[in-house]
Image (cartoon, rainbow, N blue to C red):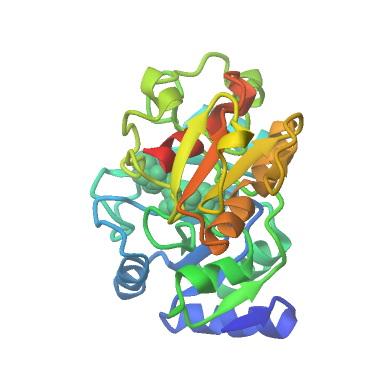
Amino acid sequence: MIVTADAAGIRRAAEMLRAGSVVAFPTETVYGLGADAFSEQAIAEVYRLKNRPSWNPLIVHVANVAAARALAAEWPDVANELAAAFWPGPLTLVVRRAEHLTGVGADTGTIAVRVPAHEVALKLLEAAELPLAAPSANRSESISPTTAEHVLRSLPDVPLVLDGGPASWGIESTVLDVTGEVPRLLRPGALGLREIREVTGAIALPEDVADGSARPSPGMSRRHYAPRAKVVLTEEVDASALDESVGVLTYETQDVPGAEILSADPKEYAADLYAALHRLDDAGVATILVKSPPDTEEWLAIRDRLTRAAA
Ligand code: TXA
Ligand code: MG
């Protein structure tokens, strides 16, 4: 059920989490399906509800840098600098994992952590007094939820969804591995590379992260973030070839009747993308034609998601 994220709602969600239940909650990127990061049973429930493969580890959400450090075996200087610059915010850091933390998936010896920039998420973390493992609150491989309703539609068995309104970024966090000499991008996301480089200098950008063909982080399966309809990327949508079975997702300049027309600003585009895909799916189209976004770094995360949706 969906519960307003007021003081009573947050208290109730925190109690459920402390009792080993899962709860979906809003973050600034997308909604997460939260569980006590120390409860193997709660985490197992996350994997079961999402139908998520066990090799794909979860991001742990914490209230502050100190709580993140407590989960790490090593906390490099660059993690401090990045946390100071971007936390709370849509940057996930992969660091060496403290030994007492097991069960957040895949035995990689590392852990992914972030401090979410959402009042409800932060209040929930404070009230629960637990680090919360939380993947996006959707069935594995489908579109991430940017509203409480999206969560329930994808995961009808979630016992409680805290409703904090639509997510402001609308695209998942950027995942950066800081265990090596040079920080390495594992998943492009809401936080841009230009901002990160201002803090870290060069970052390693595995070539195939950009074209969506590789799996640098365990979760980056080739097909992901996909609606039910078949997604086809195209340079220009041919409006004369459309019929009722085809939906169109384009941006700004092109005027196609009945199309979802998003902003030409990548940040605004990202904020609306998943909701637009949900709407096209709801319309029951068999195919979604998507006008390819520009091939620039600002659009990297969006291109990544669209390429995977089309795979
Ligand atoms: O914005 C977000 O990051 C959202 C909100 C809820 O915080 N969460 C999210 O989680 O997108 P999820 O589970 O859908 O994606 C987590 C990504 C996956 O690609 C996963 O493989 C990667 O992070 N990841 C998690 N732990 C990792 C680790 N120890 N090493 C490398 N990659 C890891
Ligand atoms: Mg996900």
Quadrant position of residue 311: top left
Kindly tell me whether residue 96 is visible in this rendering: no
Quadrant position of residue 25: bottom right
The percent position of residue 110, horizontal first and vertical second, equals 33, 43
The percent position of residue 291, horizontal first and vertical second, equals 59, 32
| Placement of 168 over or under 148, stated as above or below | above
| Placement of 150 over or under 297, stated as above or below | below
Asked whether 176 or 146 is in front, the reply is 146
The residue located at (59%, 31%) in the rendering is: 238
The residue located at (35%, 37%) in the rendering is: 217
Q: Is residue 45 left or right of residue 12?
A: left
Kindly tell me whether residue 246 is visible in this rendering: yes
| Placement of 16 over or under 25, stated as above or below | below
Give the number of callouts.
0
The residue located at (71%, 41%) in the rendering is: 262
| Placement of 78 over or under 89, stated as above or below | above
Q: Is residue 226 left or right of residue 108?
A: right
The percent position of residue 263, horizontal first and vertical second, equals 75, 37
- For the N terminus, which image quadrant? bottom right
Asked whether 172 or 182 is in front, the reply is 172
The residue located at (72%, 62%) in the rendering is: 119
